[in-house]
Amino acid sequence: MTQQIKTERLRLRRPQISDAGVITDYVNDPRIYEKVARIAPGQTMKVTTGWLESVERGRRKDLDHVFVIEKDGALIGIVGAHRTVADAPFEIGYWLAPDAWGQGIATEAAGALIGWLEETRAARDFTSGHFADNPASGRVLEKLGFRRTHNAPVFCLGRGHDVDHVFMVREPKTR
């Protein structure tokens, strides 16, 4: 099983429990937790460690493939793919440290993950989405070939209420 994916500027590697402190610090920034549906404010190390353990269990079942995004040796974000059953499309998700925004890093990391999933898991269909008030994330997904399917409210743990969410799909490339 691949432990890492390399791009021109980035190294994507499987997260380790030792990353929990840095991840916890980042996700407690409202600029991150308010843009990700499943991160609550005030996340503790225990919650982060539990999440890391759950994604490792999911990886063994081919349901979760989560990678730390590193640039110049520093952890700057997370990119991952999740599905609930083995034949379902992967849902792509990511977050970046605010200092890394606007540099094409999310596009590069998510594109590398999608390519890896296509090559190693024979994945062909992908879903994703973003909150409507986060158009930058929508531009990342559009660059990766996703298209909007519909909008609907999604509960955001970080905000504590439903937020308008743009659902997107990436259909298989013709070969």
Image (cartoon, grey):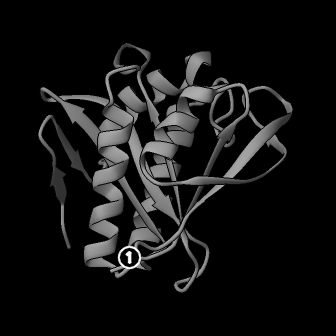
Q: Residue at x 70, y 35 (%)?
A: 131
Q: Please state which amino acid type lies under the numbered disc 1.
A: Arg
Q: Residues within 10 Å of mark 1 (few under 14, many from 20)?
A: few
Q: Residue at x 58, y 79 (%)?
A: 88
Left or right: residue 8 compared with residue 29: left
Q: Residue at x 46, y 60 (%)?
A: 81
In the image, is residue 128 above or below residue 72? below
Res. 4 image quadrant: bottom left
Residue 89 place in picture, x, y as percent: 55, 73
In the image, is residue 121 above or below residue 57? below
For the residue labelled by badge 1, is the local secondary structure a helix, a strand or a loop? Answer: helix
In the image, is residue 142 above or below residue 61? above
Residue 145 place in picture, x, y as percent: 47, 54
Which residue is identified by label 1? 60
Q: Is residue 122 visible?
A: yes
Residue 18 place in picture, x, y as percent: 29, 39
Please tell me which residue lies in front, 95 or 49: 95
In the image, is residue 92 above or below residue 107? below
Q: Quadrant of the C terminus?
A: bottom left
Q: Quadrant of the N terminus?
A: bottom left
Please tell me which residue lies in front, 9 or 33: 9
| Furthest residue toward bottom | 87
Q: Residue at x 40, y 20 (%)?
A: 101
